[in-house]
Image (spheres, helix red, strand yellow):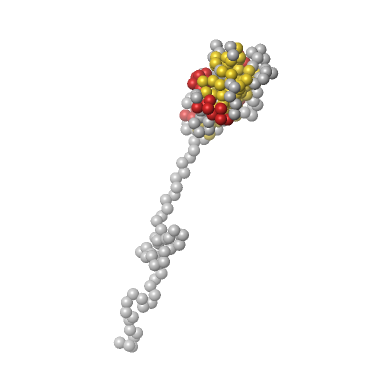
Amino acid sequence: MAAQRSTLEVTPREERGSRAVRRLRRDGYVPGVVYGRGDEPTSFKVDARRVRAVLAEGHALFDVQVDGAALPVIIKHQQRDPVHGRLVHLDLLRVDLEEKIQATVALELEGVEEAPGVKEGGVLEHVTRELTIEALPTDIPDRIVADVSGLGIAETLTLASVTAPQGVTLMDNLDETVVATVGAPSEVIEEPEVEEEAALVGEDGEPIEGAPAAEGEGEAPAEGAGGEDKPAEGER
């Protein structure tokens, strides 16, 4: 959790409509809206570089300064460009610092390289990457960490084994939420060697008519074939 909250300075936004919003983005701004606390939503625009810097700090709670007033907020929703990943719209939720709220935080793993199952060649899968928690806004952690250093092959870590920070309640099902699992090493199956076919075959798999067969294969030559007929006894 951040000891001192960051401040994001924004400007009230009068522009409306998709054309005006596209112009804002071309000029280096990100449009957004602040919701919550029973007030009317406040539309704003913010310098794209500044908002990227604040979000990169990873803090769940920060202040938005608009018209000289600092409002404590958390992120409600981020909309990003599906191709380039750029932030194109930001929804913020105003909060009461004395009232518990539910929020989504990242769930990270530690001790992956030390896990016995990984050392034996097993594959660790990070199943759950976000958690729903309940806490005072000032107690919302930037992330929650799960220790997987004791996982062996074919073992699973559930949320029941994760310790929440003080003042934080985990809202997901503790016993049914799988955090990570280690699968057995994948076996390499060698393909059997295929003997070369003696006869030439076409694309349809059928033998090519008139193609020579391999030595020792095929039907025996017909009687009298392959040379002059021998005269029968008595015709000499």
Q: Does residue 227 appear to the left or right of 108 in the view shown?
A: left
Above or below residue 39? Residue 236 is below
**Is 23 in front, or is 140?**
23
**Is 138 in front, or is 76?**
76
Locate residue 11, reporting x and y percent: 56, 18
Tell me, yes or no, if residue 104 can be seen here. Answer: no
Q: Does residue 179 appear to the left or right of 200 in the view shown?
A: right
Q: Quadrant of the C terminus?
A: bottom left
Q: Does residue 232 appear to the left or right of 21 in the view shown?
A: left
Above or below residue 180? Residue 68 is above
Tell me, yes or no, if residue 29 can be seen here. Answer: yes
Question: What residue is rendered at 39% in x and 71% in y?
Answer: 220
Locate residue 24, reporting x and y percent: 53, 25
Question: What residue is rendered at 42% in x and 50% in y?
Answer: 193
Question: What residue is rendered at 43% in x and 60% in y?
Answer: 202
Above or below residue 71? Residue 224 is below
Locate residue 79, reporting x and y percent: 57, 28
Q: Quadrant of the N terminus?
A: top right
| Quadrant in the picture for residue 170 | top right
Question: What residue is rendered at 45% in x and 47% in y?
Answer: 191
Tally of numbered tags? 0
Locate residue 45, reporting x and y percent: 56, 21
Above or below residue 208? Residue 151 is above
Q: Which residue in the rendered view is the most extreme toward the right? A: 38
